[in-house]
Image: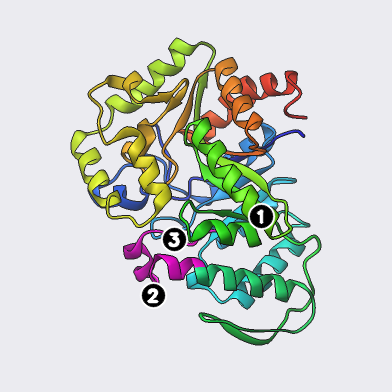
Amino acid sequence: MTLKLHWFLPTTGDGRTIVEHFHASRAAGASSAREPSLDYLAQVARAAEANGFEGVLTPTGTWCEDAWLTTAALIRETRSLKFLVAFRPGTISPTLAAQMAGTFQRISQGRVLLNVVTGGDAVEQRRFGDWHDHDERYARTGEFLEIVRGVWSGKPFDFDGEHLKVEGATMRAAPDPVPPIYFGGSSAAALPVAARHADVYLTWGEPPAQVAEKIAKVRELAEDQGRKIRFGIRLHTLSRDTSAEAWAEAGKLLDAIDPERIAHTQKQLSASESVGQQRMAALHGGKTDGGVRGLEVYPNLWAGVGLVRGGAGTALVGSHGEVADLIEEYHAHGIEEFVLSGYPHLEEAYWFGEGVRPELVRRGLVA
């Protein structure tokens, strides 16, 4: 099966640094040289489309522009690009979410994908009025997705759960096709929800063996439910014509980070309830004393991004061929979709599209 490649819309801002207006980093001060204007995001979206990416992930959170509004505005700026819209079940009615996705699907002619973000940061959740604890949030997400799929059936749907209740939930017209649901989470509370409801289970970029272990768990849980799901991975990428050039660029990114920024970010992220975030942090331990290659946690897998960024914290770094090699290795473990990003997102879309993608095509991994 050929791979699906997706890119990222930097709705927190963009620039030639890995420090963003994102999660814990935001409180430490300004970072982005390029504001996330609609004109700039349209450039990134068109670059992704021109370089063969199927879709773009749009994040959700305090420091992002709203994912639904931003992507809806970009429909007319693109022709075939799909929009992987991230949203949080704790901040929106499931019936309304089903209606919004249905409307998006119709006006875009089938170009919406849904990324359900349960949330692992209690401080962030409470900003949006969500006071559930970690495990309750995942239990509620399961109920939320049960309702969304019920609404999409096209018939009035009743549901009475522990966290959510609807009566006669329906919509004007069921979406056709039904938008696929992307879902992530590494905790014991998350995996059963993914197995029961997700079309694509997303993991952050841990080394291949750890990713394979997680895939095996989710696949087994899904099979117990009589389901088959696909697997994707969220990574950054930095590829150049030679390995030395790529690592030199990674070194520049690392050298540009203020040690105080790293300490501040790691202190904030250490309070996260997210198991996935904890696993990301364990890869680098907040230390930079080994230099840029000291953060290489697996051949051509660099954990430097996670020093100052919440969420996905690893990058594929190397020559175009080396990056393609690691993508192929992940694929051998069951990964079928890659959600990628790079700094700046406009330029890196071209570096990947013109450098790595032809390698993947040559190997028969991408059509």
Residue 102 image position (x, y, % from top left): 72, 68
Q: Compare residues 14 and 287 and report the one nearer the observer.
A: 287
Q: CA distance from mark 1 to mark 3?
A: 22 Å
| Label 2: how many Cα within 10 Å (few below 14, some 14–19, many 20+) | few
| Magenta-span inclusion, residue 237 | no
Dividing the picture into quadrants, the one containing residue 196 is bottom right
Q: Closer to the camera, 39 or 79?
A: 79
Q: Is residue 32 visible?
A: no
Q: Position of residue 261 (x, y in %)?
A: 23, 40
Instruction: Give the residue type at disc 3.
Output: Gly
Is residue 149 positioned above or below 231 on the image? below
Q: Residue at x 45, y 13 (%)?
A: 245
Residue contact between numbered discs 1 and 3, judged by CB atoms under 8 Å:
no
Mark 2 — residue? 129
Q: Earlier in the sequence, mark 2 or mark 3?
A: 3
Q: Position of residue 130 (x, y in %)?
A: 40, 73
Q: Would residue 146 be seen by someone viewing this image from the given angle?
A: yes
- Magenta region: 113-138
Assess whether mark 3 and mark 2 are in contact (beta carbons under 8 angstroms). Answer: no
At 48% from the left edge and 12% from the top edge, which residue is drawn? Answer: 243
Classed neighbour count for the residue bearing mark 3: other residues with Cα under 10 Å, few (<14), some (14–19), many (≥20)? many
